Image (tube, rainbow, N blue to C red):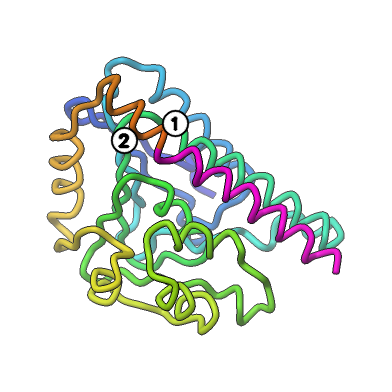
Amino acid sequence: MEDKLLVHQDLGGVRLISLNRLSVANALNQELYESLVQSLYEAQNQDKVRAVVLTSASKSIFCAGADIKEFKTENLAHAKQLRRDLLLRTLEAFLSFSKPFVSCVHGKAIGAGVMLPLATDRIFASETAQFSFPEMALGMPSPLGIELLLSRLQRSFVFDLIQSGEVIGTQRALEINLIDASYGEEDLQNKAIEWVQKIPSNFAFECNKKWMNQKLFERVKLSLLASADFDQT
């Protein structure tokens, strides 16, 4: 395993946070979830950081989603609950982060690896990015994925991604508004940094963002409660 699950770099007031659990395609385990929460907490409380860009240390993979091998010694229902709790705490950190926050997606984003960018202000993607929700093929209900997607997409597009398990590339993601912009591999990070540097990180921005995100987070919590109920039926 890599020494650091996250790599940080400060570029002119913008903190670049790169997922770096590359040996397992940046699969999200407890340690990586907690590192993300702590990293955002630190960025929130450091005046020198006025914005954050989330990306991957690899250009071939953004995030493979939840590490389903973790908690394998637990019974299945308890393991699912542990993963939900970790994801909820992380999404709360994402949605409550009051400064400009952008995701740069290189390569594949799968399941929870799509959900994290959906909780940021903008999603920029490379021309070779792919997005998918494999939960249906695994027989797993995905109320959370549905809720996050509905904050951006029309219902029919959510159906295609969740119920059909469609894997979509960058061009399709642009067409349905899953992502906000696409750039070449070499330009993606710089374009994201340029965007956040143009956004005023001030009190008005913080208040507006809080208002936009607070109802989404309430729906996120309800969706995870629904997932827990489904496990008991």
Secondary element type, mark 2 = strand
Dot 2 and dot 1 residues touching (CB under 8 Å): yes
- Badge number at residue 40: 1
How dense is the environment of label 2, judged by Cα within 10 Å: few (below 14), some, or many (20 and up)? many
**Would residue 206 be found to the left or right of residue 183 on screen?**
right
How packed mark 1 is, by other alpha carbons closer than 10 Å (few <14, some 14-19, many 20 or more), is many
Q: Which residues are magenta?
A: 212-233
110 w.r.t. 164: above or below: above
Queried whether the magenta region covers residue 226, the answer comes back as: yes
- Image location of residue 67, percent across then percent down: 62, 59
User: Which type of secondary structure does the marked residue at label 1 adopt?
Assistant: helix
Residue 187 in which image quadrant: bottom left
Please state if 114 lies on the left or on the right of 163 as rendered. Answer: left
The amino acid type of the residue labelled 1 equals: Leu
Alpha carbons under labels 2 and 1: distance apart: 8 Å
| Residue located at (36% from left, 52% from top) | 56
Q: Which residue is mark 2?
A: 52
- Most common secondary structure along the magenta stretch: helix
The structure residue drawn at horizontal position 36% and vertical position 77%, both measured from the top left corner, is: 168
Residue ID at (74%, 49%) = 82
Measuring from the top left, give residue 156's x and y in whole percent.
Answer: 42, 78
